[in-house]
Image (cartoon, rainbow, N blue to C red):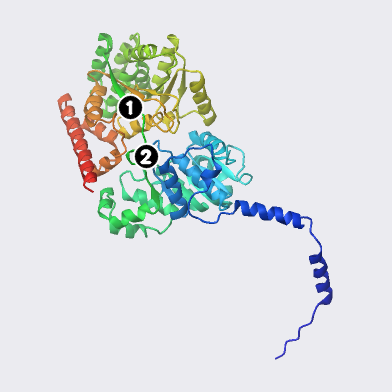
Amino acid sequence: MQVHIKDDKPFIDMMDDVLQQEGEKASWEHFQMAYTAAKETNIDTFTGLVAPGYLPHMTFHPHQLEASRRVVEEMNGRAILADEVGLGKTIEAGLVLKELMIRGLVKKVLLLVPASLVNQWVNELNSKFHIPAASQRKQYIWEHYDVIVSSIDLAKRSPHREIILEQDYDFVLIDEAHKLKNSQTKNYAFIQSLKKKYCLLLTATPVQNKLSDIYNLVSLLKPGYLGSYKQFKDTYGDDRRDAEEHHYLKELIRKVMVRNRREETGLQWTKRKVETIWIDFTEQERQVYENMQDSTSAAATFAKITLLRELCSSREAAYLSMKKMVEENPETGNTYLPVMKEIEKLPQHSKALKVVELIKAAPPGEKFIIFTEYRATQFYLQWTLKQHDISSVPFRGGFKAGKKDWMRELFEKHAQVLIATEAGGEGINLQFCSNMINYDLPWNPMRLEQRIGRIHRFGQKKDVQIFNFAVRNTLEAHILELLYKKINLFERVIGNLDHILAELQVSDVEKEIKRIFADSRSEGEIKVKLDNLTAVITETGEQLERDKLHG
């Protein structure tokens, strides 16, 4: 069969005319300019990082450069950054993002971080990495900005959720990613649904007590990488300790996770100086404490423990809790009302007066951060400090992001003291302060390390002074003496505590301690059980150290 081809001469002539003419931006001069620009920005190889050369004002530590290089070169931009607290995961993540943007691989970016850290992330990206990030608040800017920082709680709500799920993101980052360890939550499903090319998950605790934690995180990065959940569980079990026996699993995880520990960085850290401040109750306070112990003996164990802890913190904390209990259940009035009347007669709290004494004795200009477990104590401390002409600002989880930023700035530039609750202290960096008062000791050692990590981190130029307050012959004394001192938790960096607890299959020390108090019939029994717990934790830690030395 013969195919007849006919030239369309008018069309050919028209195309010839178009090709002979110069377009608006097709002159030789413009072409040379475009070629020169492309040549200058062209990266000949994909080995090594080019971003540090674009950031001469930044000083990166070797472990940060190596972590970023591994994520870009070996992990294809999908990784878990799991450095210990204070080693600079934010810096590593910013460097990875900058690298991918310079290489032209990333434009559309979404960062989901705790609400209290949104502004901090925006400021870091703009000021340190020259990445034009914007914070998403109530306005719908998802489609109009290339780099957006938001909280996951806002992003997952309608109408934001629907807009976000329509976007094609080049790069997604999740901070505090350990909160996604449960694959059955709405947050997990939302992150899984995002369209993303590159993805970073940031967490200091990638595995808390179950191997399924790491399986779920890895599945967000690379679905199917560790097989189906059933295959994974059948092969490796769900006990975290089993992972040590499976070298193949460890190698698989190593290919998607970077975890640096402080002792491995080779960096010189400022020291931690720890001092225990013992407080003696006045005779009147001691009488109230003992009466509360006796009168609440019929109350639920958890309620009794809580009230005794609160009385060690402030009159206000214990009083308000009992008042609420009576309002919710008037039948408890016979138990609590007599103690409440005794509390009303207390003139002040000995622990708060010791805080004033400590701060007044410090050199001029020394700043302090005080951590308390209770909102009522926070208010009381602020009032007490004001009575003694000591300037302070509060900081708590309920504050909106803008107010948190304002409080931090007031503390840095004006106030001498910042009084923080546990939730308020999440994620804030306070390297300009080197004194911490643990007014109320947490019963979970990991929370203690998070507190200390606010000031003992990169950028801290002074040795850190930690003051631990405890009232003699109370629950606080038991915890300080039998848990913290014997395990030496204050001096050591609790980088391997998560390993120790996993080895013991203890996922929550605080719950374990409460169980001991609840199940014990006497002070002596409590002491024996706490002694046993601390002895086992100490021995397990020493065994892990020996195992590490012998490979």
Which quarter of the figure has residue 322? top left
Which residue occupies 25% across, 32% down? 513
CA neighbours of label 1 inside 10 A, class few (<14), some (14 to 19), many (20+): some
Which residue occupies 37% across, 39% down? 84
Q: Which residue is mark 2?
A: 84
Closest to the observer, 296 or 468: 468
Whether residue 23 appears in this view of the structure is: yes
Whether residue 75 appears in this view of the structure is: no
* Residue type, numbered disc 1: Arg
Decide if residue 155 is on the left or right side of residue 511. right
Placement of the N terminus among the 4 image quadrants: bottom right
**Taking 43 as reference, is 309 above or below it?**
above
**Taking 67 as reference, is 453 above or below it?**
above
Mark 2 vs mark 1, foreground winner is 1
Which quarter of the figure has residue 385? top left
Instruction: Give the x, y percent position of residue 268.
Output: 36, 33
Instruction: Give the x, y percent position of residue 372.
Output: 37, 23
Q: Which mark is residue 539?
A: none
Which quarter of the figure has residue 294? top left
**Taking 250 as reference, is 487 above or below it?**
above
Instruction: Give the x, y percent position of residue 116.
Output: 49, 33
**Taking 160 as reference, is 532 above or below it?**
above
Q: Which mark is residue 272?
A: 1
Closest to the observer, 532 or 363: 363
Closest to the observer, 373 or 367: 367
* Residue type, numbered disc 2: Glu
* Mark closer to the chain start, 2 or 1: 2
Q: How many marks?
A: 2
Instruction: Give the x, y percent position of residue 404.
Output: 50, 28
| Real-space CA distance between mark 2 and mark 1, rounded to the nearest whole angstrom | 17 Å
User: Element type at marker 2?
Assistant: loop
Decide if residue 539 is on the left or right side of residue 452. left
